[in-house]
Image (tube, rainbow, N blue to C red):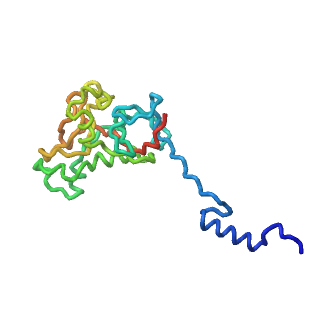
Amino acid sequence: KEEMTSLPENDVAINDIYAEIIYGQKGSSSEEEEPTPTSICTSTSGTVSYALGTSYTCNPGDGVERTFYVLEDNGDSVSLIMNENIGDNVAWITQEDYEAAGGTQWSSNTDRNSFGPITANNYLESQTSSWTVDASLPTYDQIYNVNNSTTLTNTPWLYENLQSSSDGGPVGYWTSTPYSSYSNMARGVNYVNGLIGRSVSDTTDGVRPVITVSKSQLSQ
């Protein structure tokens, strides 16, 4: 009898089926490698750091590189805030959006902040609709915890590109946090006074995007 030098056709097919079940790839005997995370932000100093205020150049998915600063270390991820507002100034919530959400107390100047920053959130979403990374408003705690204070004097990166209205503004940007002591106000960042309360209908403030990315998406 001649010695068999190769598997019969049927046995080859069965072998491929077993490989596909066990390894997830037909005809392969090794596991697939996990894809390398795509870098979203590159350090401007050439060193990856999670220290608050560290500057990165980030492409949030629309092909435009923008400057962001580390705002919060979340363990496996970091939140970064952009160095300027995006778009125009906008109210935290307008009367129209308040009433559309079911509010009935606008005329009495109470309860205005109970539905959150609907107008500001909608505007931020419209300005970042081409991004592949979700953007949000900063929270009061995120800003406060940088200095453990409402004063931002030692952290100019938190009020970068803000100026007086007489110089063209914008004078500040909104956080997502309502002012607990005043139902017609919300928390914002002002270029002079740091964290302040401002009427929710004020239109001298804008929105400043915060993105959260995995630390594996930061590069040198």
The image position of residue 204, as x and y in percent, is 25, 35
User: Of 143 and 24, which appears nearest the observer?
Assistant: 24
**Image x and y of residue 110, in percent:** 12, 49
Q: Quadrant of the N terminus?
A: bottom right
Residue 88 x, y percent position in the rendering: 33, 37
Q: Dividing the picture into quarters, in which one does residue 47 lie?
A: top left
Count of numbered circles in the view: 0
- Left/right of residue 144 with respect to residue 213 in the rendered view: left
In the rendered image, the residue lying farthest to the right is 1
Residue 78 % position (x, y) = 37, 42
Q: Is residue 93 above or below residue 16?
A: above
Q: Residue at x 44, y 34 (%)?
A: 48
The answer to which quarter of the image holds residue 157 is: top left
Dividing the picture into quadrants, the one containing residue 206 is: top left
Which of these two is toward me, 118 or 143?
A: 143
- Residue that appears at 26% across and 43% down: 139
Q: Residue most toward the left?
A: 108
Give whichever of 129, 31 is nearer the camera.
Answer: 31
